Amino acid sequence: MTDVLVPGGRDVRGTLEGPDDASSIVVACPPHPEHGGHRGDRRLVAVSDALADRGLACLRFDYGEWDEGEGEREDVRNAVRWAVEREWVDRVGVFGYSFGASEAILASASLAGRDEGSGSLLSADAVAALAPTARLGARSDLDVVTALAELSCPVAIHYGTRDTTAEWEPVVERARKLRDRDTDSPDRIELVDHSSDHFFVGQHVTIAEEIGSFFARVLE
């Protein structure tokens, strides 16, 4: 376990875990910080453990000062930049739960091109979202449904069919349409439904194993 200070002008701190010989890393985004979300969230820890079992590293981090979703999106992008710049990293995935799931999609959709400082290619190689909501606040540029269509990497969306907290239905509907339309890569988008509410009580380990397997398959 290693403490990480993510560069980028905001106070973003994380915990790096995983085997010493890992060549792929997953950036894990916590739920809403104003509602107690942090890097120690049980769902994030369970995913980190599942990734380690499969030889992948995981960076769980805390967002900087609350910024209505905009600064938090930049926190995710900066965490991906940090991961890309590690010499030992070949591929980078992004995972998030709830607010973090939406930020994972938003940030990954906006990452493209090369970092001006390092010259490294900035992109997410895979995204997994657990209980994403369709929009963060009233900002038109934080539209998760629109951002989802801009992703070209493998995507896994897990959702609870009894979830009344997040507005997940528009995200799943768009993902299903994108999947059905993509005849060349029909398996690029995975949709996994769970008989659960927003908190997935008692299902953390099972869901983490499924998400860990997804990343192990698409990142290795």
Image (cartoon, rainbow, N blue to C red):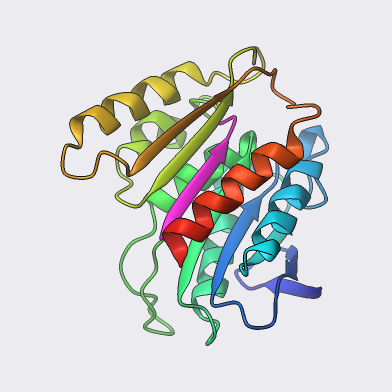
Question: Magenta segment, principal secondary structure?
Answer: strand
Residue 64 on image: x %, y %: 71, 55
Task: Determine the residue positioned at 70% across, 46% down.
Answer: 30
Task: Determine the residue positioned at 60% across, 77% down.
Answer: 22
On whether residue 106 falls in the magenta region, the answer is no
Q: Is residue 89 left or right of residue 154?
A: right
Q: Is residue 155 left or right of residue 168?
A: left
Q: Is residue 130 above or below residue 220?
A: above
Q: Is residue 50 visible?
A: yes
- For the record, the magenta segment spans 125-132
Task: Determine the residue positioned at 73% across, 73% down.
Answer: 5
Task: Determine the residue positioned at 80% across, 44% down.
Answer: 41
Q: Is residue 71 visible?
A: no
Image quadrant of residue 70? top right
On whether residue 127 falls in the magenta region, the answer is yes
Residue 42 on image: x %, y %: 81, 43
Q: Is residue 60 above or below residue 31?
A: below
Q: Is residue 48 left or right of residue 123?
A: right
Q: Is residue 43 above or below residue 166?
A: below
Image quadrant of residue 136? top right
Q: Quadrant of the N terminus?
A: bottom right
Residue 50 on image: x %, y %: 69, 55
